Amino acid sequence: MQAPDRHELNAGQTLPYVYGLDRLVLLPQTPHRLFAYWEITPLLWKNMHDRYQDLWAAGQTVLRIINLDTGSLRQPAVDEKAGNWYVSKVEADRTYRAELGRILADGTYLPFLVSNTIRTPRASLAAAIDPKWRPFAFWQHRYYRRIPGGLSSAEFCCPVQESQIKGESS
C-alpha cells in the first residue's frame, strides 16, 4: 500500500463555512452539558423579518432547551450569528430537544428552528452488570491464582527453590 502524497490530501479545496441549510443540531457533550450549533440562511431571516417587521427587529433570539422527561425548559438569550452555544447544568440521563426562536417585542415566542432529540448519558455506573463483563477484581484474582510462588512479581520472575525454604545450602 502506497502512502498518499501531501498534495493529494488537500487538493486545494476547503470545507465551506456554511451549507445553505436551515438547521439546529443538539449534541450531548457530557452528562451535564449540551452543545448546540445552527445555521440560519439569509432567506429565512429575511422572511421572518418581513413577516413580523418591527416586532421582529425589537425581539431577542433565544435557545430554548426542553427537558422532555420533566417538561421543564431553559431559555438563554443567544446571538443568532454565533452559530453555536454550550448549555451547562443539565440533568444526566434525560431526553432533550432544542428550539431556536425569537421572543418578539410583544412577548410572543416564535420558534423558527427545531433540533433533533437527544438523551444525555448517565453520570454513574449501571445498576446491573452484564455477566459477560465481570468486574476487574474477578479477573485479577483469577489471573494471580495462576502465578507460581505467590503474588509477588519478584517471586514470579525468580521462583524460590524448596531447598532454600527448608534452610538447606546447596
Image (cartoon, grey):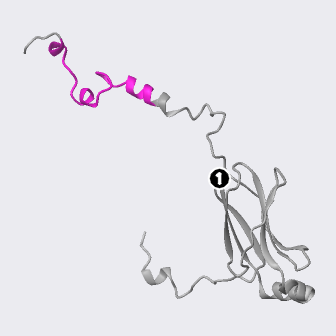
Residue at the farthest left position: 170
Which element type, helix, strand or loop, lies under badge 1?
A: loop
> In the picture, which quadrant includes the C terminus?
top left
Q: Residues within 10 Å of mark 1 (few under 14, many from 20)?
A: some
| Numbered circles on residues, count | 1
* Residue drawn at the location 61% of the way across and 40% of the way down: 125
Say whether residue 155 is magenta: yes
The answer to whether 139 appears left or right of 89 in the picture is: left
Q: Quadrant of residue 88?
A: bottom right
Q: Quadrant of residue 16?
A: bottom right
Q: Quadrant of residue 14?
A: bottom right
- Please provide percent x and percent y for residue 110: 88, 74
- Please provide percent x and percent y for residue 86: 66, 66
Q: Which residues are magenta?
A: 140-165
The answer to whether 17 appears left or right of 113 in the picture is: left
Say whether residue 143 is magenta: yes
- Please provide percent x and percent y for residue 57: 84, 86
* Residue drawn at the location 67% of the way across and 56% of the way down: 89
User: What's the residue type where badge 1 is placed?
Assistant: Pro
- Please provide percent x and percent y for residue 93: 71, 48
| Between 134 and 57, the one nearer to me in the picture | 57
| Between 102 and 26, the one nearer to me in the picture | 102
> In the picture, which quadrant includes the N terminus?
bottom left
| Between 116 and 98, the one nearer to me in the picture | 98
* Residue drawn at the location 92% of the way across and 86% of the way down: 51
Task: Look at the picture and state if 35 lies above or below 155.
Answer: below
* Residue drawn at the location 67% of the way across and 79% of the way down: 82
Residue position for label 1: 31
| Between 24 and 62, the one nearer to me in the picture | 62
